[in-house]
Amino acid sequence: MASKQPSKLSGFVYSNHGWKYSVATRYALFLLLGLVFYFMLAPDLLPKRYDIKEGSYSAKEITSPKQIQDNKATLKAQEEAAEDVQKIYKIIPMRADNLVTSLLDRIDRLNQDDLISQSDKTAIYREEIPRRANDFILNFVASNRSNGTYSDTLLEEMQREIKEQTYVIPEETYIKIPRLTSQDIIEMKPVARDIVIKLMNDQILEAQTARAKVAEQVSVSSLGQRTAREVTQELVRLVITSNKFYDEEATKEAKVQARENTQPVYIEQGDVLVAKGQQITPELYKLLDESGLLRNEVNYWPQLGLLLLSAMLSAGLLVFIRYSGGSSTFKYNNSQLLMLVLVFVITMISMRLAAFIQTDAKPYIGFLAPVAIGAMLVAMLLDMSLAYFCSILFAILSSIILNVQPNSVFDFNFGFFALIVSYVAIFATHRAGQRSTLLKGGIMVSLFGCLSVFMLTLLGGGEWKEVDTLYSIGFSFAGGLLTAVLVIGLMPFFEATFGILSALKLVELSNPNHPLLRKLLTETPGTYHHSVMVGNLSEAAAEAIGADGLLCRVGSYYHDIGKTKRPFYFIENQNNMENPHDSIEPKLSKSIIVAHARDGVEMQKEYKLPKPIRDIAEQHHGTTFLHYFYHKALKLAEEKGVEPDFTEEDFRYPGPKAQSKESAVVGIADSVEAAVRSLRKPTVVQVETMIEKIIKSRLDDHQFDECDLTIKELDIISRTLKETVMGIFHSRIEYPEETKKPKKEEGAVNT
């Protein structure tokens, strides 16, 4: 059907008059939104510049627009940190106990050789013992250099230190060595080895310090023979060397690390760079120039760029809304557009607050911004498809507002993060029926936000710091929970201020403890049961054509609330009693019947029910014709022999006709339920024929002319109602195959 009224959303009935539908107001709101974009993004995209010359005096106080690294102070701090680094020493343990044992073995073998004279042995020892000690050190250095255990520089330092501290055995010791017997050497070995091990287990920077302790260790040993003690003492002193050496490379590396680990010194955002009246020195001028605060010439290009960006964002939203409705009329009224502008303002303010505490050193604080709040509110208050489009805009805005990169307009990380959490928020909450669902949606936003942050960190390419990553994940998780809290707090405000009927509100209205529903149940139980059945039918039909099924169900609960004023004039409430219409004039009966729609609207207004619910109660009968009472009035006039003083129009509901799909669906379901209930033994064919007849009758009566139901959708409604009726009234409807069964089987099937 071609729509003759402005488009609807969730059952709203609109008037063609007033500011809500003014075209000028509509475009003024989009202009306002563009200005909001301009001023919200100006602090990030428009640089502050000053016309200052070197050597002049500043006419105003200049503060840092962002966090700026102070290179001079940073360099000084790095040098101080490097100077504080202490020299690094490495321990290089050598098995000197093996060396002293090897020397004693050589002495034992040589002393047992009777072919060599004692004087020759003395000469051999004088030459061989120092050489063996030196070779031992050289071999140790060579093996460690080949396997890379220590750096070459450290090994060279070790060789140099040991060479400088080389011990020279006294000449008389070489004379005494040939006098040692094999038994003496057997006793000397464990003593010498134990002393070497004990002394070299300590860190020895100066070998002389350890050698001074040898005499004491030998004197308390088990050696009794004087020569053995003296030789042991000298050999131990020879093999004992330093084992703690200065590591120049490690020290240099530590200084480098100290410089690198020194935190940069920053001029914080808002700190005073130049005081009012202060002279601009060359150093200050350079700092201002590096900070991008100098304006050497007038440049309005950034303002033009921001203006174009703001216009594109606002115009893009306008075009999307204009052509996404699929009709020639605008999809939302100005009240809803004003609400949309307010949602954008709230979302950008929340981003701006997060950006206020965000710094260059801690950009991850930006993940705390509840960027999904706008998408969640739009999805719940307006439309899911609009929420998807707005999510793209929110992603663009967050990539600008939360960007801390100095030479970039957009930060992809924050834009991608905002897009992901916004889409997740829409999926999680667009049909939320309970307040707790919003909290669950917030948790989903938190989890997917953490996942996207971790993914972006892994894809960063360079090294990533575990602490910063954990902070980013933590702030993104907190941002999701903050989103849920803010949405829960803001939803009642938008619902009350702009008259929005959200799914949350509908679920609250469907509570049987609502005063009107309790009144309906206690005073008109038949109507209550009828309303519940209509709700089941209308919800199924509405969802089949993409309309708001929940609104149809709740609207059905309240659509006949006006019958509580005169309950016994309606057949579903007439139990074991005469029909009062049999004894009154048809015109009066007609007035009583049609009044229930008007009475219902008045009662709903008294209880402040939202307008979409009231519209269903007012429009579900449209301007349909009361055939029974019209023909009864004609018959009565004929019996009296007078000309009728009424027309068919006098026996019609006052309307208005259904203005929305939801009102039309509830009206059809209302007639279908009443008709099925009136059948004693309905069959499938009867149900199908009856549903088609009701829809065709309303169609021929032009009851759908003012809503946007199509013929295809009416066909879908017909099929859906048939299937739903079969399910609800299964035990009453006779199926074709049942009519052919014997009676005894029929009873078994119907039970």
Image (tube, rainbow, N blue to C red):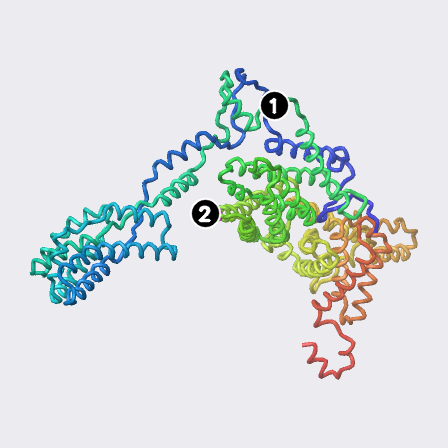
The boundaries of the magenta stretch are 465-470
Residue depicted at x 52% and y 15%? 57
Q: Is the residue 104 above or below the residue 269 in the image?
A: below
The residue singled out by tag 1 in the image is: 295
Q: Is the residue 60 above or below the residue 378 in the image?
A: above
Q: Nearer the viewer, mark 2 or mark 1?
A: 1
Q: CA distance from mark 2 to mark 1?
A: 40 Å
Q: Earlier in the sequence, mark 2 or mark 1?
A: 1
Q: Position of residue 239 (x, y in %)?
A: 21, 54
Q: Position of residue 454 (x, y in %)?
A: 53, 51
Which residue type carries mark 1? Answer: Arg
The residue singled out by tag 2 in the image is: 467
Crowd band around label 1 with a 10 angstrom C-alpha radius: few (<14), some (14–19), many (20+): some
Q: Secondary structure at mark 1?
A: loop
Which residue type carries mark 2? Answer: Val
Quadrant in which residue 394 is drawn: top right
The overriding secondary structure of the stretch rendered in magenta is: helix
Q: Which mark is residue 486?
A: none
